[in-house]
Image: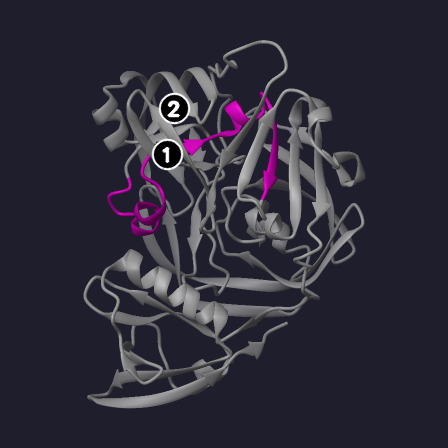
Amino acid sequence: MNHLKSIFLLPALLLTACCFAQYGQEYDKYGSLPQKQDDFYYEIPFEYNGQIMMKAKIGDNTFDFAFDTGGYNMVTDAVQQQCKLEVVGESILGSANGIIKNTPKVYMPALALGELLLKDLQAYQVSFTNSPLMQCMISGGFIGAETIKNYIWQIDYPNRKIVVTNNIKTLYGVEKGTKLNVHLNKQNQPYVMVNINGTFQYMMFDTGCSSLLMFSDKDAERYTATARIAKLAGSVVETHNGRVRDTMYAFEANLDAGGIKINHKPALYRKGTNLTLLGSPIIKNYIVTLDFKDNALYLQPIKATPVTDGWEHFGFTLEYNGECVVIGALLQDSAAQKSGLLPGDEVVGVNGAKIACSGYCDCRETFNKLMDASSNISLLVFKNGKEQNITFKKEKIF
């Protein structure tokens, strides 16, 4: 049985994390040969919304695909139907929120990322019907590990481009970066050895995870006896199969990756989580070069964006539930929790104005920007039959 990695969602930047890593049987067809065999160098623009998103063409159709080192090639139902992709098999796929179903495999003759033409691909066909976060971000699917392992990729966040090549010498400054040794598992997913709170730990480097650190509950047990822990009530666990609400936890983590140190960051975990991941936020502070044929990953500091230690947050998230805006996740012992707020409380105004956004995607983007940029926020909450205005400041959690 294959198991898709779960997607853990805490909206509005309280550890916003959607992790698409998967584990299961070895993928049976890799394909993805470059359109020419001599040295090549292509630049592919991307956008970042917690996922690295690239435009991809299948025939005459253009879609948004996520770049996912921790997952398989995947396409949506809509892509399969619109592009008339042939179904060539199926597998039973389960996810960490307990949902299991048969998932078709389809054949793609070609997929173009800018000038790079990928050929002879297989992909899992998935549905986002009950996954509103993925509907916001992804119209096409995922470029997965079985394709990524074939090339050298440099993720350049300041310039919002990915360079893909077969010759690392064409990439500037790689030799000055910190090199981490990479182990690829049977699914070609990359693992690196790092140090967490003084203990060495293998982590999958997963660009499909929008949390910096995500731990399996088993691995988390190595740290939670001595680390500070935060409880996150009302969190959402979402996969391509749908979403459930659950309690999640975060412990205070200090990361050392080959001498690169990032301190006092939350490492997210919950009961039943089975993967330990180093996620995509690291690209905001380091240019990341992936050379999996040489079993290497390089991190080059982006001097304009130094890593800041610690974790600050308002202690709650806001989300659109289909009818109105409500309190989503809530941090235990935060000022928000002590004020009497509960997950599901209706919010009718923010900072003295009525809420203008409508729809899940519009509200998610609005609230993410607001809560990321603000130090203070005022909520007008409808609770116990009356409106109540409450003002919060960002708190230092770790």
Horizontal side of residue 381 vs 97, given as left or right: left
> Which numbered tag is attached to residue 141?
1
**Which quadrant, please, contains the C terminus?**
bottom right
Residue 234 shows in the view: no
Q: Quick one: 140 or 93, which is closer to the camera?
A: 140
Q: Are marks 1 and 2 in contact (CB under 8 Å)?
A: yes
Image location of residue 46, percent across then percent down? 47, 40
Is the residue 357 above or below the residue 53 in the image? below
Task: State yes or no: residue 359 in magenta.
Answer: no
Residue 316 shows in the view: yes
Q: Quick one: 154 or 298, which is closer to the camera?
A: 154
Horizontal side of residue 215 vs 132, given as left or right: right
**Which element is circle 1 on?**
strand
**Which quadrant, please, contains the N terminus?**
top left
The residue segment tinted magenta is 128-156
Residue at point 34%, 16% (across, down): 107
Cα separation between marks 1 and 2: 9 Å
**Which element is circle 2 on?**
strand
Residue at point 58%, 9% (across, down): 37
Image location of residue 7, percent across then percent down? 43, 48
Question: Are there few (<14), some (14-19), or many (20+) residues within 10 Å of tag 1?
Answer: many
List the residue tagged with mark 2: 123
Earlier-in-chain disc, 1 versus 2: 2
Q: Quarter-wise, where is residue 349 in the image?
A: bottom left
Q: Amino acid at mark 2?
A: Ala
Residue at point 44%, 53% (across, down): 8
Image location of residue 95, percent across then percent down? 40, 41
Task: State yes or no: residue 130 in magenta.
Answer: yes
Q: Quick one: 16 or 185, which is closer to the camera?
A: 16
